[in-house]
Image (cartoon, rainbow, N blue to C red):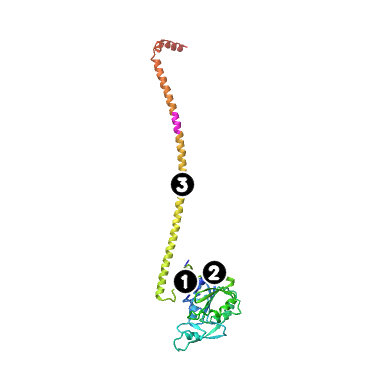
Amino acid sequence: MKPFVSYAQNFEDVMLWRALKHVENGFYIDVGAEDPSAGSVSKAFYDNGWSGVSIEPSPSRIEELLRQRPRDVVIQAAVATAESKLTMFLMPGTSMLTGHRTIAENLSDDETTLEEVCVDVISLKQVFDKHPDQTIHWLKIDVEGMEADVIASWKGSDARPWIVVVESTKPFSQEASYREWEPDLVAMDYVFAYGDGLNRFYVHEEHRSLAALFDHGPGVFDDFILSLSGNSPALRDAWKTLAEERSRADGAADEITKLTAQVDDLSAEVRRLDEQYRSTNLALSAEVGRLDEQCRDANLALSAETERLLSAQDLVDRLRHEREAILSSRSWRLTRPLRSVRRFLKGRR
C-alpha cells in the first residue's frame, strides 16, 4: 500500500486521514481552500477519490482550483453573515484575503494603501443547503480571522459534519482566538478532540468514537510522506531522494516477498519429498523384512533337507559297506553253487 502524501501546512490532512481513511469516496467542505496543492488540507483526500466543496475568495486562486479540481464544486466567495457583497483586504506579502482591515494593516510595514477586493458572500447554511442529502465527513475553516463569522453563518442548518477543523489562532501568531466561537460549536454537540497549536479539531457527538483517534499527533505509524509542492529546492531534492529510496525499498520488499514465497514453496516440496521418502523407506523396510523372513524360512528348510540327504547318504554308504562285506565273505563264496542251481530251477518253471 502506498504511503499517504501530506500537503497541509500543519499535518491537518494526516490527522483527518487517520480518522477517516476507512471512508471510500468521502465528502468534505473546505472553507478557505487557498492553493489547490501547496498547503491544502483537501488535496490528499481528492487524490484518494474524495470530492467536495472548495470555497475561496481570492481571484488568483480560483482558476487553479477550477483546473485541478474538476470533481469539486468550486465557489469563489467569502463565507460570512454579511449580505451579497463583502470588501476584503489583501494581506501584504501574500495572496490571502481577510475581511478585517486591522489584520491586514498589522502585516504592513509601511503606509502603503491596502488593496481592496469586493467579493460575493455565501453563508455556511447556504452551502449546506445545496447538499441536503450529502454526508459531510469533514469541514475545515481557515479564513484569516473570520472564523467566528463563518461559524455564525451556520445557524439555521441541521447539517453536522463528522469532524470540524478550525484555525484557532490569530493570523500569523500563536495567540488563541477560539474562545469567541467555540461555544457555538459546543452548542451544536461538538466535542474538542485535538489541538495542534494552530487548529482545533472537533468531533460531533454522533461520531464521538473517532475522538480516540486524535489522542496523539502525527507520527511514523501514520505512514505518510510530505509532498514536494511548496517546499524549498533543497527540501524537494531531499524528499525526492527519500521517495526514490523508499520506492527502491518497496521494490526490494516486494522481491523479498516473492523470494520468501518461493522458499515457502520449495520448503513445502522438500517436506513432501521427505514424507514420500519416509513412506517409501518404510515400505522398502517392510519388504526387506518380509524377504529376510522368507530367506530364514528357506535356509531352515534347506538345512533340514541337507540333514535328511546326509542321513540318507550315510544309510547308502552303510548298506554298500555291508553288501561289500557280504560279497567278500567266505559264506557267500561257498553258497555260490547253490545260488546257481536255484536260479536254474527258477528259470525252468
Q: Amino acid at mark 3?
A: Arg
Residue position marked by numbered label 1 in the rendering: 5
The answer to whether one can see residue 249 in this image is yes
The answer to whether one can see residue 29 in this image is no
Residue drawn where x is 55% and y is 79% of the image: 179
Left or right of residue 182, residue 2 in this image: left
Q: Amino acid at mark 1?
A: Val
Q: Which numbered circle lies on residue 212?
A: 2
> Which secondary structure, mark 3?
helix
Around disc 2, counting alpha carbons within 10 Å, would you say few (fewer than 14), some (14 to 19), or many (20 or more)? few
Q: CA distance from mark 1 to mark 2?
A: 23 Å
Foreground tag (1 vs 2): 2
Q: Are marks 3 and 2 in contact (CB under 8 Å)?
A: no
Q: Is residue 310 magenta?
A: no
Q: Which numbered circle lies on residue 278?
A: 3
Q: Position of residue 60 (x, y in %)?
A: 48, 82
